[in-house]
Image: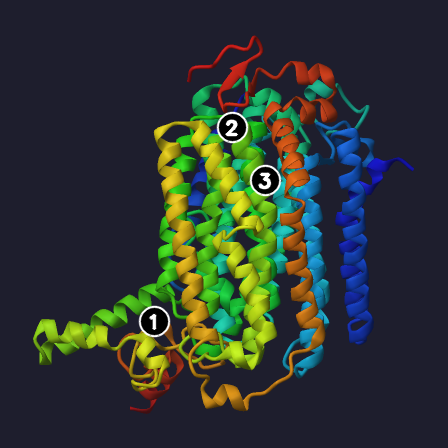
Amino acid sequence: MSIELLLALPVMLPLGGAAVTLLLRHHARVQMWLAILTLVAIFSVALVLGYYVTQAGVLVLQIGNWTPQLGIVLVADRLTALMLLVSSFVTLAVLLYSSAQTVSENVERTPVAIYHPTYLALVAGVSMAFLAGDLFNLYVGFEVLLAASYVLLTLGGSASRIRAATTYVIVSLLSSVIFLAAVAAVYTATGTVNLAELAVRLDAIEPGTRMMLELMLLVAFAIKAAIFPLSAWLPDSYPTAPAPVTAVFAGLLTKVGIYAILRLETLLFPASQTSNLLLAAAALSLVIGILGAVAQTDLKRVLSFTLVSHMGYMLFGIGMSTQMGMAAAIYYVAHHITVQATLFLGAGLIEHRGGTTNLIKLGGLQKLAPVIAILFFIPAMNLAGIPPFSGFIGKVGLIEAGISYDRTSGWLLIAASVVTSLLTLYAIAKIWNRAFWQEPSEEIIARDVPTPRAMTAATAGMIAFSLLLTVLAGPLMDYADKAASSVLERTPYVGAVLGDEAAGELRYRIDDQGTKIDGNGQEVQE
Amino acid sequence: MPVSLALLLTAGILIACGVYLVLERTLTRIILGFVLLGNGVNLLFVVSAGRPGLPPFEGSADPEEMTDPLPFAMVLTAIVISLGITAFGMALSYRAWQLFGHDEVPDDVEDRRVLRRRRRRAEDAARLPWSQALSEESRRGALAQSQGFLAPEGEDPLGSDLTSAEDVPQDATEADEGETAAPTRRERTHRREET
């Protein structure tokens, strides 16, 4: 058995698991354990893939042995392997958390029967989007994860969830239509949807057409990644879902969008003219998102707005497209998936204990529930970028990259990211003050529900993982650095999919300083 | 590459109609709009296949004369996906109709807040001078409220919990008309029938 066959598992396992769990809908316990087992298997596959990718470079699986231009290819390079590893860990931890929650709460209200299959379908969609080697498969991956997310968001069909889902479904449908139209346009212009082949052919087509294709795809991905000004849907839809669902959405779905933007800006349209546009969008996301967070009075809404804001950090790294910036962005994505999901799990714990996430009603949780306080405090400080946590390391990496980028836009972005970091701390301090300090209301004292141990353990596991990102920051940054250089060079990816001859046809690559250079090492003037 | 003008025009008209319907307020029309949009985009794929040729069976003809099959494979996938999503959208709008008696898309939460606050200010301003109305507003701080100095939410439009998971049919678009929730459309038609 060749090692490439492993690439199909992160997609096939959850899909099969979804089918089987759906058949076992009357056996809630079996369903739960099957889902957990599936995710454990995916996590181990991701570990193995991570190991082989560091050994062998890019892994390619051609499904059905079609030629890559016609068939479906799954590709894993370092970036993909890292994304798969982090996402499979987060989905596993969240599933454990939600299983404990559904066991502890009254089961009649939550339709458990469809929760596990849908959750596994979501995981399949996310893995497929990360592994997809062609644009149309990326679209299918997006659709799978979106369709699953529609169902998860409307679990129970209560009034507030239907309301929230309406906006979410409409916005997501719109982005899908734009994406699909862009795929059609790309096929018309180039005659292929394979990413590696596109990288070769897009270099050769007219600049005007290129720009149009790039902008269409960028808009579609930016809606999914919730980049300002395409972010208004997020704070309205995410907070109404159950806490574990919100944790997965916040951690993963937006990052799939960022991943797609990263591929778009490196593999398909290297160092294009849109980099200033991206940097401007990053700055606006950072500042406007965090101002929104400061103004909120509901815990989950505050966290949703910080999510919108912190998408700007990753876009900052991608927009510079220097090696340092890209490496820091990749590290930051891994950090942010973990920390944002942990925070929403923490919010779920608070809701479980306090009965609400409204900061005006909460209070005094530090004395009443010291464990929850610790479990919320660590990721919160991590998000704000307090040393020595991984958020600090990621932000320092981005700011260093911005300094060495040394352009006006870079300096402006540095200012925006420092201000945002400070305001994040302010928003976090506000949450802390309202929810954990103050005198607790009698309602909260009276509501003495024990927190299920598995919920606490899953949150603690996520925190341990985020601390691991801090402890292993050195090797991880090294890994991210190699991932970034392979992504910027483009030849390893194209060479692995199409062969070295095609890789030789690539006209441009990006050097360490983020400038676009042609085959002779000359800078390209646009 | 030769392009069929008829197909392109049809796609354009479908997309234009789709966009018009998506800009409507009720979910059913929006879903119908997305059906049209999706069909228009699917036609773009057919356009991208180029000039029609012979059926693409291996060995039946010269590959140069065959139709490009790849766009059709993609269109088929896209059709299946849009079928599923449309079914979900219809179910969603039916559920909304069950719960609220209509399937109008709610306003943005923040927009609602800003509107309510402005309305409240305007009411205050009628009774008080502007400066006092403002200080009243600012004194109604959320911190003071959390410490129990002020009356709890309900009186304060900003303090109301807009994201609680309680199944209170709070009607966004119509609650804005006044403090008490306006009757739903179904109730209104009932009333009209009675009079």
Circles 2, 3 touching at the beta carbon (< 8 Å): no
A73, above or below B53, in the image: below
- Of circles 1 and 2, the one toward us is 2
Q: Quadrant of residue A77?
A: top right
Q: Which mark is residue A330?
A: 3
Disc 2 marks which residue? A322
Q: Residue at x 68, y 27 (%)?
A: A493
Q: Residue at x 50, y 66 (%)?
A: A239
> Are the residues under badges 1 and 2 in a single subunit?
no
Whole-percent x, y for residue A502 in the image: 69, 17
Q: Residue furthest front?
A: A388
> Are the residues under badges 1 and 3 in a single subunit?
no
Q: Earlier in the sequence, mark 2 or mark 3?
A: 2
Whole-percent x, y for residue A373 in the image: 55, 71
Q: CA distance from mark 2 to mark 3?
A: 12 Å
B26, above or below A176, in the image: below
Nearest the eye: A25 or A282: A282
Circle 1 sits in a helix, a strand or a loop, which is it?
helix
Disc 1 marks which residue? B173
Q: CA distance from mark 1 to mark 2?
A: 47 Å
Task: From the viewer's perspective, tell me whether residue A514 is left or right of residue A283.
Answer: right
Q: Quadrant of residue A81?
A: top right
Q: Chain of mark 2?
A: A
Q: Residue at x 65, y 33 (%)?
A: A483
Circle 2 sits in a helix, a strand or a loop, which is it?
loop
Amino acid type, label 2: Thr
Circle 3 sits in a helix, a strand or a loop, which is it?
helix
Circles 1, 2 touching at the beta carbon (< 8 Å): no
Amino acid type, label 3: Ile
Q: Which mark is residue B184?
A: none
Sort mark 3 into few (<14), some (14-19) or many (20+) by Cα contacts within 10 Å: many
